[in-house]
Amino acid sequence: MNRRDYLLRKFGLSMVTIFVVVIINFLLFRVLPGDPVRAVVGRNVRISAQTQQALREQFGLDKPVFPDQFFDTLGQWAQGNLGVSWSLRRPVSEVLMSKLWNTVLLIGLGQLLSIIFGVILGLLAGWKRKTAIDVGALTFSLIAWAIPTFWLGIILLAAGSTWFGLPTGGIVSPINVGKPLYTVIPDVARHLILPTFTLTILYLGEYMLIMRSSILEVLSEDYILTAKAKGMSHWQVLWKHALKNAMLPIVTLIALNLGFTVSGAIYIETVFSYDGLGKLFQTALTKQDYPLLQGAFLLLAVSVIIANMAADVLYAVLDPRVKES
Amino acid sequence: MNENWALFKRNLSDFWKTFRKNRLGLLGAFLVVTSILVATFAPWLTPYSPSDIIRDEGGHGLTFASPAVHAPLGTDDAGHDVWTQLVFGARISLMVGFMAGFIAMFVGSLFGILAGYFGGAVDNLLMRITDILLVIPDLPLMLILVATIRQMDLKISPLTVLIAVIGLLYWTSTARLIRSQVLTIKERQFVARARAIGAGHGHIIRKHILPQIMPLIVANTVLILSTAILVESGLAFLGLGDPTQPSWGTMLNFAFDRSAVTNGAWWFYLPPGLAIVWVTLGCVLLGNVLEEMLNPRLTAHHLEGDQNMVPRAPSSSEETRGMIAVPGKGAE
């Protein structure tokens, strides 16, 4: 299989996956009990029978579910029209966009820190296998895996706010809203400490484990023995020969982890009342705001699928073994 | 039959001999077994029922009371005994986790066996389904699924919905693992011979493939259980548990929503989390040890020890007698 076929197959699978997500999203919206008009205007709005009928015609709800309504909805979604949020009374896409960057900031910081520390610790653990570093790293990742994300968040929240005087939630303190940037930025940073720390601990373990097993595998290759036999020091072997190859799985893991990252964001933003997509999703869930829920799901799922595809492309570019059959 | 039983008993005792030397495995087994015991004997471990409200002499409910003799883990925001909630919560958490885990294991094994054994178009179809499910972010998917199913007035208990959704989404890793094992087993000679003497697919899968992958399925199930329990706690924390049958996750949901943190009621939000860690850690330790015992991997690499190619001569000359220098095994 050459590189082009490989990429085409990955692309095809991503498209199918997006299609599946769209179908799930469409169907779930339809199986909800009650009048679909309510789904468009919200449950608690009083409207007359004529208005209802007019709305029904306007939104095409008098037409059959398939194919008319299905393709109509599809077209709307493709144009970024995700309906109107029941609880916020604003277009869903507008609400999503206003929260998107907060989440990107949080996730980005958490991922960056956990990749840096995960790679370093995993490298050390694999190299110094069966030593204290290795056992410590393994124990840490094991415990980090077993701890529920939200509970870790709650504990860090309690500890951080009690002992270190860190803010308990939000992104900016209310008094600093609208102040100049040199006041706002340090305040935002203070608010980011606890959620980012929680996220980093959460992701760190997995990066460390993958890096460890990857470096173990690479270090068992014959070319490492050759390099060592040439008289290179361990550091040289690790830096010049092992690291590059061992980093490959990390590249795919970053994207594969994105789904997991999204879960982490939902929990952590809920615990720290961090005003991002995760918190929005949780609020939409408790308020049973279905248009918002569906829109958020569509956005999250499609971004994760595209990120996965990007990782596959990157992998094909980085790993020469994908080139030839 | 008798012969099989003797063989089974011998294998089991061999297994136990290896297993009991593994401290982490024993620790894992201890954590899992104790939690199952607590869940089973919950009513005997506390004088109260989960709905009892602890009152002071004047008959007032004690809310957020710190730990005392009559309530070893204090009380929650409604005056319930936290310890009672905890031991009864074990039942819900473990039940949902175990049932979802078993569903996931069953679906995963089925997909893995069918895909691996039949190959070709079946394999392609089943593995593409697995790939698709693997990429869709699981938590948002579960949240909208559970939320919509709840709205549909299907008269299904909330816990059943949780079990079904977790079980039907977490089988992908199992399916891949089992498939790769089946792929190697079906190429072995005993399968070819069975086929040559006319054995059908059903017979080969039941009598030749299944016994070979059973240990792997068991190890994987234990690992899946930990995932299922963690996921249940997360969904319950986000408010999708059954408030009338609180699990550990539901307890944390109550604790967080009713500001146990700002009230400093650590006895309300620490124990349920510790209980979750107790069980999941137990499952992970046990599962990893089982997997390691059944699925041996690399045991050494080239940069182990110091930078010398040949191990340093031990100080006592007696120890070196009969020793052959093995590169990479220097300092061990």
Image (cartoon, rainbow, N blue to C red):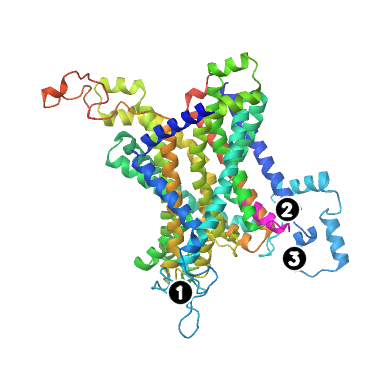
Residue A26: image x %, image y %?
73, 48
Do the residues marked 1 and 2 share a common chain?
Answer: no
As measured in the structure, the alpha-carbon distance from the residue carrying label 3 to the one carrying label 2 is 14 Å
Q: Secondary structure at mark 1?
A: loop
Q: Is residue B143 magenta?
A: yes
**Image quarter (top left, top right, bottom left or bottom right) of the N terminus of chain A:** top right
Few, some or many residues within 10 Å of mark 1 (<14, 14–19, 20+): many
Residue sitting nearer the eye, B323 or B136: B323
Camera-near label (1 vs 3) is 1
Q: Nearer the viewer, residue B73 or B12?
A: B12
Q: Main secondary structure of the magenta part?
A: helix
Q: Which residues are magenta?
A: B141-156
Q: Position of residue A82 (x, y in %)?
A: 70, 53
Q: Which residue is mark 3?
A: A43
Q: Amino acid at mark 2?
A: Phe
Q: Amino acid at mark 1?
A: Phe
Give the number of the mark in front: 1 or 2. Answer: 1
Q: Is residue B328 shown in magenta? A: no
Above-or-below relation of B18 to A54: above
Against A325, residue A198 (above or below) is below
Host chain of mark 3: A
User: Which percent across, then down, holds residue A262?
Assistant: 54, 49
Q: Position of residue B191 (x, y in %)?
A: 57, 19
Q: Which residue is mark 1?
A: B64
Residue A180 seen in this snapshot: no
Residue at x 67% of width, y 65% of height: A87
* 1 and 3 marks in contact (CB < 8 Å): no
Kind of residue indicated by mark 3: Arg
Q: Which mark is residue A256?
A: none
Residue carrying label 2: A29
